[in-house]
Image (tube, grey):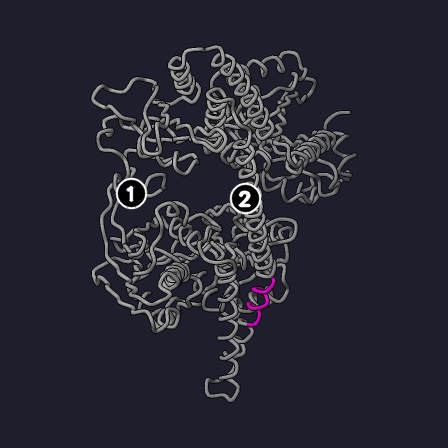
Amino acid sequence: MADPMILVDRHGYIVDYNPAAQQLFSISKQSYQPLVNVLPWPALHTVADTLETVRVELNCPAHPDRFFDITIVPVESHDGSPSGRLFVFREITERRRSEQRVKEALQRFTDIIEQTPLVAIQRFDHHGVILEWNRVCEQFYGYTAAEACGRRVQDLILSGHAVTEFEQQIEQIWATGQPVPARKWQVRTKNGEERWLYSAMFPLFSQGQVSDIVCMDVDITDLYRAEENLRRQRDQLDTLYRLTLDWLNRRNGKDLLQAITDSAYRLLNVRYVELLLAEDDRTLAIRACTPLLPTQIESAALAALSWRAFQSRQPEIVLDYTQWPERTPDYEPLNFGPAMTLPIIVGDECLGVIGMARARQEKPFSSDEIQHAVLLTQLAALVLDNANLYSQAQRELAERKQAEEQRAKLQAQLVQAQKMEAIGQLAGGIAHDFNNILTVITGSVELAMLEIDSDHAIYPELEAIRQSAARAGELVRQLLTFARRQPGQPQLVDVNRQINDTMNMMRRLIGEHIQLQLQLDEHIERVMIDPAQLEQVLINLVVNARDAMPNGGELTIRTTSQYFSVNDLPPLRQIQAGKYVLLSVCDTGVGIAEQIRPHIFEPYFTTKPMGQGSGLGLAICDGIVTQHGGFLTVDSQPGYGSCFTVALPAVVTELQQVVNVHTADTTTRMTGHEVVLFVEDDPNVRQLGVRLLREHGYTVLEAKDANEALQLAQQYGDRVQILITDVVLPQTDGLTLARQLQSALPHLHIILMSGYLQRMLADGSTPPYPVLAKPFNRYQLLSLIRQTIDRVA
């Protein structure tokens, strides 16, 4: 059937049309009719108002389910002047339906990818460029979908020969259209960790041709490591078995001892091994070593550590022998680092000691290596004197007891972690709905207060309700912060003032038996931090200092500032060189032992009795300080006390203060004339917000969900100047709605409302738009609108 065509003159009157057009649009035979009367099609007439050729796809108002590809061609007279336009309509309904079906199928496939648990699924093109990346991929590899999509798989997680093999498999799939056999891959995660995956790749087809490739990965790292550990242990046992045969075949005693040190040197990857035998209760003499000691050293290089193992009959290990207080100065040129000595026990008698050491810059002994060394020493004892199994049985019992104790400790930590998670889930669960309720209470009370004079009889009661609602909102924020479910609200803080404001609380905490001294530098700069979280850090450190002085003492709180270069900063921290404000909390208590000092910032690590400490205080302090770009250090000596120092970046120049919507700014203009699209699914909050805005001059379009908001935005177009939307909405979230509308209306200002920021940004990133935290009052709402519009303007 021919395409419908209509010819109009330059005044828009129909000059001619073909039968297909007459049948489709039911054009009457009345001559010289305006096209706008025959075809009431506003969208068509809008695009047709031009002298150039136009092509557009539209659905017909008379037949909404039918779509047409419309070409509008200008017609010229014989002298070249425009004489009219020719409209050609080609129906594309079936094509649009096919495209919709393809779109729906792709969406279903995308949903499957996103919802499949425990399986990392990616879709990529012929070059390995990632097109889709599900949530399990984010968990496995550490890259978010936004970071991964658009990058090549081989650049992101593969390296070495795996890149070539991966590209060969892509070419094979593309050429044959067949999946390749599943195989193991070694990949590299975002944090540099090497992991093993069991991976299967297969093609997707479009119009009979390979269009994309889907890869499904299962993490088998634990299984692979277990297999590797089993293989390594099997190899170790096999090696030790062959060593035993070799040693038993040696008849010369000196040769046997040298063979033992040579074997330990080779198998344990150390830089020095020595074997000492006891001549009497006071003498250990070196009988063999690998390599040979320098001639100026006549006695055993690890003498002091060897005596410890000999007397305790237990392995002795130090992480850095050069820094060990009991080292012998004569041996410092050997530059020993990790060192270990093991007693050679036969029955009830200790025959001697095997000692070994690595260079100072080398890694410490792992648990597997320690176990291997113990086995080798036991074999040496068997060979030296027909090995007695009693010592081995005792060691196994001790290891079993240690494993049971460790299991009990891990179980206790798990229970504590579950408690904290339960608190977090409870806090997050109530935050959104409770803050909506508080928003309505606050707004309604303020509206009521506007209707009466301040000397009215019920005005004080209304003010009490308003203040109580504000305190309730602050309690919700504190609960979320404690449960680590909501990021803080950094602002410029005077550390000295914060300390002085908490003095009364601190004096009640520490008691009268502890003297509190302040040494505050008046010239320090301010810092950018959440005041509540800074107070939490200070109180935690003060409480720890109090507990370290049960019999009384002195507690000193000191502030100063200091410049740190790159070399002065703690290693492995994402912090920058510059000026820092230092807050130190020092006590004269019991101090911290050197061996436990590296663990004090670990979660659940505590030296307090059961039930008196969760082990989270210092871990939370360290986390808060780290989140604000600083670091936390400790200096302690047993018996003399401890000093914890918080270092936070100094704000040297005057920065623009971050907008704090929890502080009413009464100096900002409250009224406006703009058109506001207000989106909120809670009817009470929506009615309150709409009323507040309309009473202050704004034109308000209200919507209960994203669909209504999109319809209103399409209807009013550029007249909509600002969108205020709740983050949690039915069908979709407010952040997605904001981005969708701003792409269509680039001039649109955005404000997000949320009573629970963690729901909005689970990855902890900064919100892309201003956030009005619930509950809010009218000053906060109206001032943030003006700040948002006026700042951009």
- SS category of the residue bearing label 2: helix
Residue 547 in the image: x percent, y percent? 39, 62
Seen in the picture, residue 793 relative to 369 is either above or below; the reply is below
Q: Amino acid at mark 1?
A: Leu
Residue 569 is tagged as 1
Q: Is residue 634 left or right of residue 519?
A: right
Disc 1 or disc 2, which is closer to the eye?
Answer: 2
Residue 658 sits in which quadrant?
bottom left
The residue segment tinted magenta is 433-441
Does residue 58 lie above or below 239 as drawn? Answer: below
Q: Amino acid at mark 2?
A: Gln
What residue do we see at 54% from left, 44% from top?
Answer: 406
Quarter of the image for residue 16 reads top right
Residue 126, magenta (yes or no): no
**Around disc 1, counting alpha carbons within 10 Å, would you say few (fewer than 14), some (14 to 19), or many (20 or more)?**
some
In x, y percent, where is residue 267? 44, 19
Residue 572 percent location from the top left of the image: 36, 39
Q: Which mark is residue 406?
A: 2
User: Magenta segment, principal secondary structure?
Assistant: helix
